[in-house]
Amino acid sequence: ELYGATKGFKEELGKGGFGSVYKGVLSRSRIEVALKRVLHGSKQGVREFVAEISSLGRMRHRIMVQLH
């Protein structure tokens, strides 16, 4: 489903320590999303990744979308 939403991870929005972020559209709801594809060989550890997801989940800002 995620592969289809991003049309094969074609449109890259940016890169980070864990991998790249891609633009996508969910097929059922037609909601536009940004998907982070985590690289298994990334230089960051699991603790750092969990910390990033945790902090993003708590963020509320007028120019940022909510994490789902």
Image (cartoon, rainbow, N blue to C red):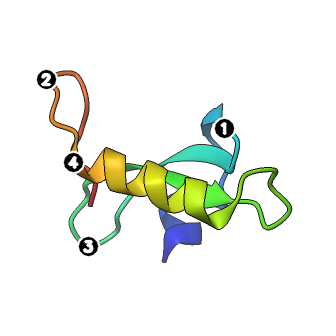
Q: Eyeballing the image, is 21 above or below 15?
A: below
Q: Which of marks 3 and 1 is nearer the N terminus?
A: 1
Is there CB contact under 8 Å for labels 4 and 3?
no
Establish if 26 lies above or below 64: below
Alpha carbons under labels 3 and 1: distance apart: 28 Å
The quarter of the picture where residue 47 lies is bottom right
Q: How crowded is mark 4: few (under 14 residues within 10 Å), some or many (20 or more)?
A: few
Label 4 vs label 3, nearer the camera: 4
| Residue that mark 3 sits on | 28
> Mark 4 = which residue?
58
For image coordinates 76% across by 60% down, the residue present is 39
Q: Nearer the viewer, mark 4 or mark 2?
A: 4
Q: Label 4, label 1: how many angstroms apart (C-alpha)? A: 19 Å
**Drawn side of residue 20 relative to residue 33, left or right:** right
Q: Are marks 2 and 3 in contact (CB under 8 Å)?
A: no
Residue 56 place in picture, x, y as percent: 33, 46
Give neighbour class at mark 1: few <14, some 14-19, many 20+ (Cα, 10 Å).
Answer: few
Q: Residue 66: percent from the left, percent from the top?
A: 21, 46
- Contact flag, marks 4 and 2 (Cβ < 8 Å): no
Front tag of 2 and 3: 2
Q: What residue type is labelled 4?
A: Arg
How far across and down, in percent of the image, does residue 13 sit? 57, 33
Quadrant housing the C terminus: bottom left
Task: Name which residue type carries label 2.
Answer: Arg
- Sequence-wise, the earlier of marks 4 and 3 is 3
Residue at 21% x, 48% y is 58
What residue would you read off at disc 2?
A: 62
The residue where tag 1 is placed is 16
The amino acid pointed to by label 1 is: Gly
